[in-house]
Image (cartoon, grey):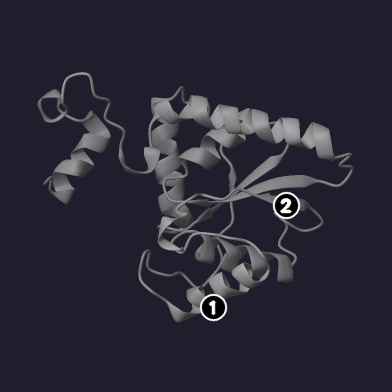
Amino acid sequence: AVSSELYKSFEQTGCPTQLVPEGSLWIPQGGACALAEPGVQNLASEIKDWLRDVQEFEDPFCVVLPAGTGTTALFLARHLEGVAAVVAIPCVGDAEYLQQQMSRVDAASGDRREFPAILDMPPTRPFGVPDPALLEVWETVRAAGLEVDLLYAPRAWEVLLQACDAQHRLVRGKKILYVHSGGLEGVG
């Protein structure tokens, strides 16, 4: 086992080679590294293809996704620039924490400073702690026919639904594509 303090030091300096078996690749928790960019670039290409196939969007369009480290949102913002606005909803910490995480990954991957918008609304909730209000959001989303995870999606949908109700500038009048973050294993 690796202590929390030691793991955090790996985020800054990389994982010591003696801890990683030869021929292996170390990817930090949350995929928070430059190695994630090619995969997210593929996702951006799929979104562009989908847009070409299904839309004649004259209305503004945005891609909304839950964010822990914000790596997916950061790289989507890079590769969807000029196509769609990308909106990240912090699920692990607040907007400031998310910006710090994305800035760290950005610095390690070219320092392009092309960040997604961050949509955060009260109340803040501790990450990973069971919450009846979030379970209710999850049940509402599931009743609408969407199968989503129990960890990130409830907070993301809580914020997204509040933002839509409040006509928040980041979503007002826009068509929204929600990018699912995975994690359905614990739902079935």
- In the rendered image, which quarter is residue 120 located in? bottom right
Q: Residues within 10 Å of mark 2 (few under 14, many from 20)?
A: some
Kindly identify the amino acid type of the residue bearing the numbered disc 2: Ile
Q: Position of residue 99 (x, y in %)?
A: 46, 46
Judge from the rendering whether residue 185 lies leftward or rightward of residue 54; answer left or right: left
Residue lying at the far top in this picture: please name it: 23
Question: What whole-number distance in Å separates the C-alpha atoms at marks 2 and 1?
Answer: 22 Å
Q: Position of residue 77 (x, y in %)?
A: 60, 36
How many callouts does the rendering have?
2
- In the rendered image, which quarter is residue 79 located in? top right
Q: Give 108 or 183, whichever is nearer the viewer.
A: 183
Judge from the rendering whether residue 99 lies leftward or rightward of residue 51; answer left or right: left
* Residue under label 1: 136
- Asked if residue 83 can be seen in this view, the reply is no
- Asked if residue 138 can be seen in this view, the reply is yes
Q: Give 70 or 21, whichever is nearer the viewer.
A: 21
Residue 111's tag is none
Which residue sits at x=59%, y=56%? Answer: 119
Which residue sits at x=38%, y=32%? Answer: 33
Find numbered disc 1 in the image and state the secondary structure of the residue it sits on.
helix
The answer to which of marks 2 and 1 sits earlier in the sequence is: 1
* Residue under label 2: 176
Residue lying at the far bottom in this picture: please name it: 132
Q: Residues within 10 Å of mark 1 (few under 14, many from 20)?
A: few
Vertical placement of 131 versus 157: above or below? below
Kindly identify the amino acid type of the residue bearing the numbered disc 1: Glu
Vertical placement of 108 versus 151: above or below? above
Find numbered disc 2 in the image and state the secondary structure of the residue it sits on.
strand
CB under 8 Å between discs 2 and 1: no
Judge from the rendering whether residue 179 lies leftward or rightward of residue 187; answer left or right: right
Q: Position of residue 181 (x, y in %)?
A: 51, 49
Q: Position of residue 159 (x, y in %)?
A: 59, 65
